[in-house]
Image (cartoon, rainbow, N blue to C red):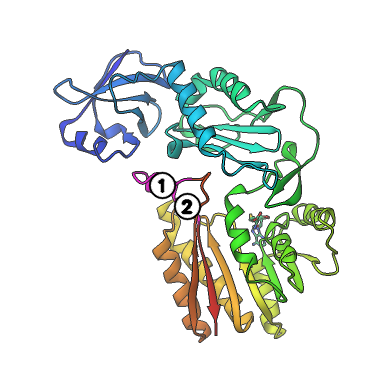
Amino acid sequence: MKRVVLKKATEKFVHSFHPWIYQQAIKNADPNIEPGEIVYITNSNNQFIAYGFYNPHSAIALRILELHESNIPDEAWFYKKIAEAISRRKNILSSATNSCRLVFGESDFLPGLIVDKYADFLVIQIHTAGVERFKQHIINYLTELSKPTDIIEKNDSDIRTLEQLTITESHTHGKKIPESFIITENTLRYKIFLGQKTGFYCDQRENRKAVSTFSSGKKVLDCFSYTGSFALHCLKNKAQHVLRIDSSKDALAIGDENIKLNGFSLENSPSLVGNAFEVLRKFRDENKRFDMIILDPPKLASRKQEKDKALRAYKDINLLAIKLLNTDGILATFSCSGGVNREDFRMALAWAAKDAERKMSIIQTLGQPEDHPINIYFPESEYLKGFICRVL
Ligand code: SAH
């Protein structure tokens, strides 16, 4: 196995167990290491530190796989890591829920590999050259361990370009996926269109349940509704009315189908296509009021550099929502921006409540479910933050 030697000053970072090592930390590397090859990483005294994927083209030069010298990351090692990740999810999958994330990259000790299960189909995303080299083995192991009808590759993320991997269209192995099919989550049914990228966000599974417990008898506004998952959970919990807003007409149309599929009526849950920032401003000017508002916007900052702009947007949208709430109203608000941490987000909410001149308390703190674990040594794996607040 080829070797990579770290500079003395940077060796200690590996002992913090963070799974990434940047180019600047490398003293020297054997010649002709292929991008994604597994290497033997040593300190400046040539003592073993870890095994990892090496990519000379990426700013993140090394991705740590294994810290024990006797556990060489070979095919059996990958098989075991995948089998363990799947086994850790066995409490999630049941007759009520047949979809979840099976492998979550660094949080499952497989840097650059994401595997999602949607009913009998698996979707894999490969973000690193290292995982790309093992792709065929990984597909074989997933086929054996999870027995899917098919595995779909979705290698269209921009992250691949950072590793000098090509962006590929999703394509299938084995049987062709149907245009749409039904998945279940918390006993509710959803139509998904994998081929057209209209998937499903499994990471909000527990939060949908938690938020909906406050919705009974309420007039609810579900902003950034996508295909209606929060709305459906609220309807199941006997919300009186749930208005769904999203900028995507197509997502709302699938949401309409989902409402009917679960036996609810569109009269109780109509949809409105629009920019949530503008629609909420208009509602404010029209003096509209709601008992509960859900805000689940898309990622507003993936990097720390975008933080300030994102915080202003979080403040704006939450300020508008707070103003639209009746006394004793419930605000369920989320941020999935990796570049904004929980404290920052909470601060933006405090600014919003203050500007709205309303009293507000956090009554529940929400995060990621069991299938999106946060690797304690890898803060980057914590991205989803949520608060349920009571607004007086
Ligand atoms: N709440 C959803 C997921 C939301 S994903 C769920 O639990 O499944 C974010 C959604 O925000 C997407 O559907 C996207 O179409 C929508 N969106 C993005 N920008 C928007 C905007 N300015 N106004 C309204 N919707 C927007």
Tell me the residue at 75%/65% (across/down). Answer: 235
Quarter holding ligand 1: bottom right
Q: Is residue 164 visible?
A: no
Say if the magenta span includes residue 378. Answer: yes
Q: Quadrant of the N terminus?
A: top left
Q: Which residues are magenta?
A: 373-384
Say if the magenta span includes residue 189. Answer: no
Image coordinates for residue 156, horizontal then vertical, percent: 60, 35
Tell me the residue at 70%/38% (across/down). Answer: 119
**Label 1: few (<14), some (14–19) or many (≥20) C-alpha neighbours in 10 Å:** some
Number of the label disc, if any, that sits on residue 380: 1
Q: CA distance from mark 1 to mark 2?
A: 7 Å
Identified by mark 2, the residue type is: Tyr
Tell me the residue at 76%/50% (across/down). Answer: 189
Number of the label disc, if any, that sits on residue 383: 2
The image quadrant that residue 29 belongs to is top left
Where 387 falls versus 110 (above or below)? below
Q: Is residue 45 visible?
A: yes
